[in-house]
Image (cartoon, rainbow, N blue to C red):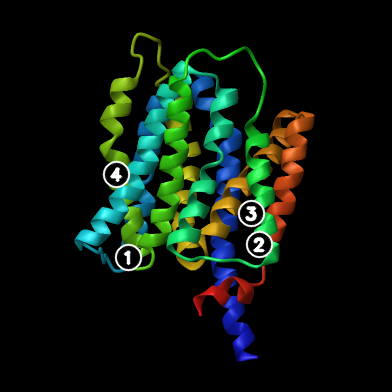
Amino acid sequence: MSTAAATMQPRRTWLGFALVTVVLWGIWGAFSGISAQRGFPDTLVYCVWALTMLPPAVFILWRNGWTLDRTPRAVLYGMLVGLLGAGGQMLLFKALTLGPAYFIFPIISLSPVVTIALSFALLHERTGKLGALGIVLALLALPMLDLSFGGGAQGVGWFVLALLIMLAWGVQAYFMKLANHTVSAESIFFYMTVGALLLVPVAWAMTDWSQPINTGRDGPWLAAGIQVLNAIGALTLVYAFRHGKAIVVAPLTNAGAPLVTAVLALLVAGVVPGPLKLAGLALALVASLLLALEPEQDAAADAG
């Protein structure tokens, strides 16, 4: 009985944090485009997002007795995670000025492939049959959730940038898991926040100030209310990686969040997904269930 409890507790821990991330990012995804639609550009949304990282970072440090790991390893890992994520976002701003979003986002959505490959090869993570099937279905679903069709794309610069973003965010998730082996989650998130803030001047400089910018309540303040969901979701993701395997957490959170977004878009705005996205959502749902139901003892077997 005690053995069963011991195996179930870690599972519930990582899964709980992963599901909170899915819900928060799903809600954030449903409303994240509102700011730009109301005249508050994405580059400034990034600045607001970086600032919304501060309250949860300070809160968890306070809750942890203001204990911050100041070792070079902690600083390096935390800053790598923060700069890879924020740097990928900077590249995305540029990519969207060069190429079509309907090609760029499906490529970026495959970042868990990088995480899975690195975690499999370097961290020797393994999963059981249910988890393996869930991973495959999630990877099939991810590009379908973002794929749409439009006019022809010109040039290859946007394609190179999309690949770099996919690589950056895939490596970011790998380092998030690697860092959790030796560094506290609270310290990782603190340095992630520092990394995000360091690139605020870059986003500020990329802003097109020749265009009118909404500085009212539905500008930066609305953006802050939406982006804090993203920030807290990033925090719970760090904890999910701390307790769970990267090869499971990465595809589950990336495939699960669009499900929540799609449901909210249907309920709030009456947006009905097209056939391709519906198929992707169905695959994502099955994949999420399989990854969540993967027996913990199978996933833990590789530890021996």
Q: Is residue 260 left or right of residue 301?
A: right
Above/below status of 86 relative to 76: above
Figure check: 125 above or below 90: below
Q: Which numbered disc, 2 or 4, marks the residue closer to the eye?
A: 2
- Residue 192: x, y in percent? 33, 49
Residue position for label 2: 131
Q: Residues within 10 Å of mark 1 (few under 14, many from 20)?
A: many
- Please give the residue where the numbered disc 4 appears in the rendered image: 195
Mark 1 belongs to which amino acid? Val
Label 2: which secondary element: helix
* CA distance separating discs 3 and 1: 27 Å
Q: Earlier in the sequence, mark 2 or mark 4?
A: 2
Q: Residue at x 73, y 28 (%)?
A: 271
Residue 183: mark in rendering: 1
- Mark 2 neighbour density, 10 Å: few (under 14) some (14–19) many (20 or more): many
Q: Indicate the secondary structure of the residue bearing disc 4.
A: helix
Q: Are marks 2 and 4 in contact (CB under 8 Å)?
A: no
Location of mark 3 (residue): 135
Task: Tell me whether circle 2 and circle 3 mark residues in contact (CB < 8 Å).
Answer: yes
Identify the residue at the far bottom of this view. 1
Mark 4 or 3 closer to N-term?
3
